[in-house]
Image (cartoon, rainbow, N blue to C red):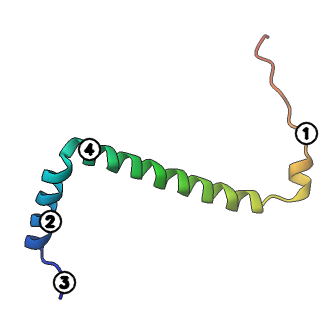
Amino acid sequence: MGFGWQELLIIAVIVALVFGTKKLRNIGSDLGGAVKGFKDSVGSDSKDEGQTAVESDTPVEKKSTAE
């Protein structure tokens, strides 16, 4: 008892009529940004766990731009 392409098309048309295409586009953009931010934060957490104490205690050299 799944949805066929005809049912999904009818549902998509009804949703577009109710919310409007501009609002749906904004919702999609916001949702995509949230997913990207979530993936970036999860990826940075796994990278941070891989660092050793020696790597994190190493001083960082600053480059001079006025040469």
Whether residues under marks 4 and 3 lie with C-beta atoms below 8 angstroms apart, the answer is no
Q: Mark 3 or 2 closer to N-term?
A: 3
Alpha carbon separation for disc pair 4 and 2 = 16 Å
Residue beneath label 1, please?
Answer: 59
- Quote the CA–CA distance across marks 3 and 2: 14 Å
Mark 4 or mark 2, earlier in chain: 2
Label 1 secondary element: loop
**Image location (x, y in percent) of residue 26:** 32, 43
As helix, strand or loop, the secondary structure at mark 2 comes to helix
Query: Given the image, on which type of amino acid does mark 1 rest?
Result: Pro
Q: Nearer the viewer, mark 2 or mark 1?
A: 2
The mark that comes first in sequence, 1 or 4, is 4
Say which of marks 1 and 3 sits in front: 3
> Can you tell which mark lies on residue 11?
2
Residue extending farthest to the top is: 67
Q: Is residue 15 left or right of residue 40?
A: left
Identify the residue position indicated by label 3 in the image: 2
Task: Work out how far the residue at label 1 is from the one at label 3, CA to CA, in angstroms.
Answer: 59 Å
What amino acid is found at the position of numbered circle 2 in the picture?
Ile
> In the rendered structure, which disc, 1 or 3, sits on the residue that comes first in sequence?
3
Of badges 3 and 2, the one in the foreground is 2
Determine whether label 1 and label 3 are within 8 Å by CB: no
Q: Do tag 2 and tag 1 residues touch (Cβ < 8 Å)?
A: no
Q: Name the residue located 14 percent from the left edge and 65 percent from the top edge.
A: 11
Tell me the mark number nearer the camera, choosing from 4 and 3: 4
Q: Nearer the viewer, residue 45 or 31?
A: 31
- Amino acid carrying label 3: it is Gly
| 58 vs 38: above or below | above
Residue sitting at x 19%, y 84%: 2
Disc 4 designates what residue?
23
